[in-house]
Image (tube, rainbow, N blue to C red):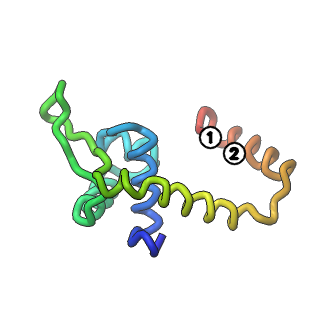
């Protein structure tokens, strides 16, 4: 992620921003299994580096939505490629059966996670 000037935690956060489609800080914290303060610090970092913005929720002005910036959207395919490359390196020594078994075990540990 260094080529994108993102830490692993920032990269993971921006992936969740894309996946969850303009989540709140609370939604991000829940999905990432981190505290709101920790996620808030990551959002602050991503906002300073130009990857995300906070916008007021149209239905509840007390809530802020985290949205990817034009920079993040322009680098989305690059971010995705980097993620696939990391996953490829991480799982390179696993065959298809190993991966199916691993997935089955993880789903037992964390029901409903995907």
User: Tag on residue 32?
Assistant: none
**Of all residues shown, which one is farthest toward the top?**
59
Taking the image as shown, residue 18 lies to the left or right of residue 83, namely: left
Task: Quadrant for residue 3, please give it.
Answer: bottom left
**Of all residues shown, which one is farthest toward the front?**
74
Q: Which residue is mark 2?
A: 106
Task: Quadrant for residue 75, please give it.
Answer: bottom left
**Of all residues shown, which one is farthest toward the bottom?**
2
Residue at x 21%, y 47% (from the top left corner): 54
Q: Which residue is mark 1?
A: 110
Q: Residue 14 location, x and y as percent?
A: 40, 53
Taking the image as shown, residue 114 lies to the left or right of residue 95, namely: left
Q: Residue 81 location, x and y as percent?
A: 56, 59
Dot 1, how many residues are within 10 Å of its Cα: few (below 14), some (14-19), or many (20+)? few
Q: Residue 22 location, x and y as percent?
A: 32, 39
Mark 2 vs 1: CB contact within 8 A:
yes
Taking the image as shown, residue 8 lies to the left or right of residue 101, namely: left
Residue at x 41%, y 54% (from the top left corner): 13
Q: Secondary structure at mark 1?
A: loop
Residue at x 85%, y 56% (from the top left corner): 95
Q: Nearer the viewer, residue 87 or 41?
A: 87
Dot 2, how many residues are within 10 Å of its Cα: few (below 14), some (14-19), or many (20+)? few
Q: Secondary structure at mark 2?
A: helix
Q: Is residue 78 visible?
A: yes
């Amino acid at each position: 992620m260094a080529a994108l000037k993102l830490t692993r935690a920032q990269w993971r956060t921006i992936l969740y921003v894309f996946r969850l489609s303009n989540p709140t800080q609370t939604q991000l914290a829940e999905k990432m299994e981190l505290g709101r303060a920790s996620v808030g610090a990551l959002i602050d970092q991503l906002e300073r580096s130009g990857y995300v913005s906070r916008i007021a929720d149209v239905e509840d002005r007390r809530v802020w939505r985290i949205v990817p910036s034009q920079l993040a959207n322009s680098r989305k395919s690059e971010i995705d490629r980097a993620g696939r490359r990391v996953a490829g390196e991480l799982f390179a020594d696993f065959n298809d059966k190993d991966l199916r078994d691993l997935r089955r075990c993880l789903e037992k540990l964390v029901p409903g996670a995907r």
